[in-house]
Image (cartoon, grey):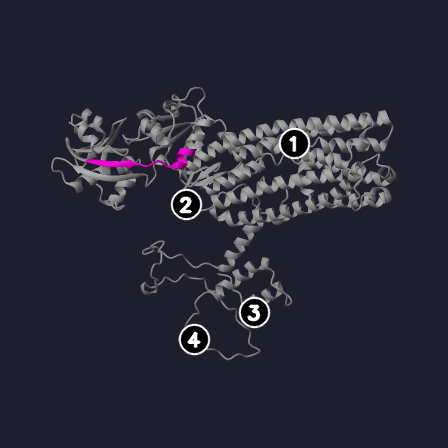
Amino acid sequence: MANKYSLDDIIKEAKHRHKGNGPIDTSKTEEILLEFSAKNIREPMEDENRKDAPFRPDQETQPMPIQAFQKKRPAEDDELEGQLKLFDSDGVEEPGPVNERVLYEKRRERAEKFVLSGTEEDTDPKELYDADSEAGKQIDDFTSYEDAPVIQAHLNSQFSGLLTRLGLSVLGLLITGWLTVAPALFLYTGAKLPLYDFPVTSPMLFVSINAAVLMLAASVNSAVFASSLRSAFKLHTAPDMPTAIAVFAVFVHTFSMLFFPERVADMTVPLYTAPVMLLLCANAGGKLLKLSRIKENFAFLSQKGVKHGARMLPNDNTTRDLCRNILGDPYIVMPVKASFLTGFLDDSYADDSCASLGGFLSPCVLLGSLVTAVACLVVTKDGALAITAFAAVCCLAAPIASLLCGNLPMKAASRRLLRRGAMLSGFPAVDDYFLTNSLTVDASDLFPAGSVTLNGIKTFSGGRIDQAILDAAALVHTAGGPLTPVFEQVIQGDDKILPTVESLVYEQGMGISGWVDGRRVLAGNRELLQNHGIVPPSLDYESRYLRARRKLVYLCSAGELCAMFVVTYRFSPYIRQELDRFARNGIGLMVRTCDPNVTTELLCDGFDISESDVLILSAAATSEFDQLSVPQETAQASVAYDGKIDGLMDVLSSSIRLGTIVKLSSVLQVIGVLLGFLLSAFLAFYGGLYNLNGATALLFQLFWLLASLIPSLLRSSS
């Protein structure tokens, strides 16, 4: 029996959740609306025989049943002019009654149990997982469109948290930066900025303020330490480790200086709170760029409809004829259609090689800093100086741009791709498509609807023009290709009037043939006619129509020449631009076509490419392509685009560019880590750490931050 709730119960629950006269908590709005929707939005029940019974105070109030909401079908007269009717439900069985209370409980339970596996460590587990629930379920990735609102809300929450982290970290950087730079400017230039003598006049307060700001920043960025500790317990490295180690070292050093304020006053021992605050800002900024990209990509991917993705073809027997056209190892990419794209979150949250390299170097930096501190203690017999050396090495040898070198150019590339209707999920996709040397496409991808114009039709032998169009449309519609939209436009998209085509055959470089209503029909060039013993018109006759890049398609039926179609091919400037980038990146184009006019000469002339950059597939390779291009139920979400091939081409070129950026940035990161270690260790051994004050360390980090981002800035603008 369905659950029933009285109106009094609903009102009491609402009052309980909203106490006082203040503004309503919007986080509770959904729960209240879900419970009231069943009562407030349905039509009032009408019963002519029902009479209101007199109310008696001693009478027990009966609970009011909540009727399931039923959709009311509009009457024909109710339809507005110009209204878009999405579907016709005549004959479709109406769904049974739904208990709104049960539906609400299921939605709330699903939201409480939702967990994103492998997402940013900033997430509060209490918000995503109910540990007391035995039926707790972990959602590893985006596997259903029903999950889209919950995942989007979670991404928004994460983004707000990271934005808060970055804002507080920048505030801490401004405070500690001023306290660090003002005394340094007075020391080197004599400039008396506010608080320039603060370390000398009030050293204890100076250290206390730095320690308090650092403690606040560390608490705000506690997720950095949690991620590092989890990885350390598993004997793994994490991109957060360099920052966590540096913060810990500076934290120990700053608090130890509370016991040696005189060393700060005479400037023999510097503080490194400002440099470590810059590390926290770079860490939060890199993650914010990453999450912003994931949010925008997810909004694109979560739209319902047929998805266009890509796949790297295997080098096996299924692609033997395709791969034999490639010199060396074949890395062939082809488009793929699917109902749903999976694995998005796993690919999106994966770290790039530059971030992973920073985590890999962190144990080396920690070991080197400990060795430096011990050696400094042995040489100088100064404990304060040894702790300072430990903090200096951890700060200067930390790869400050490890989370920015990859996420900054990836964010820029993703934003550009989304404007073109394409998406690159993350760095696993960059790694997958970095070695691409060929893209296999259908000719209809290069010449989408509107690219081919039918200029005219010439009939022969007194043939019926309407029958010629139907025969050609049936043959072309079955074979596919650039001419399909042309004939679909002629028949106004009504493919039901087309006759059946049997035994369709593609004859390479000449055209197609098949049986239509018992007649053998040919559609192709003059070579196809000659191959079947039919005399084509003279070359002089053809030349009268072959002006302004026009092409001819002959139609023959039952051994007789029936008609000649005059068509014009238009070339997309966007595809031409992407093919130029393909040539510079060493990517070739392999084209599957049944259109005899789509030849190597046509493509080279129209798209301004060389013959070595394009290849028309053979009949055997075309058969392999057709088998591999069958639409699938699911495909990998590493790449997605709206069906326009120039978007996919941009994705492949961007993958090569991003892979190059990350490799160059990784080299610069290693150089910066080595120089930072050598500089701080050298000054520690020879007692010159007073020269490596906080301002000098801050300038060193800023320099390597900008230097590491040079490949990103240069390649992103190209």
- The image's mark for residue 359 is 1
Q: Nearer the viewer, mark 4 or mark 2?
A: 2
Comparing 517 with 439, the one in front is: 439
Could you say whether the residue bearing mark 2 is in a helix, strand or loop? loop
Comparing 275 with 425, the one in front is: 275
- The image's mark for residue 50 is 4
Residue at x-position 57% and y-position 78% = 57
Look at mark 2 in the image and give the residue it sits on.
305
40 w.r.t. 404: above or below:
below
Residue at x-position 84% and y-position 36% = 267
Instruction: Give the magenta-colored segment's residue range.
Output: 564-577
Contact (CB < 8 A) between labels 4 and 1? no
* Label 1 vs 3, first from the N-terminus: 3
Name the residue type under label 2.
Answer: Gly
Name the residue type under label 4.
Answer: Arg
Q: Nearer the viewer, mark 1 or mark 3?
A: 1
Name the residue type under label 3.
Answer: Asp
Mark 2, residues whose alpha carbon is within 10 Å: few (<14), some, or many (≥20)? Answer: few
- The image's mark for residue 240 is none
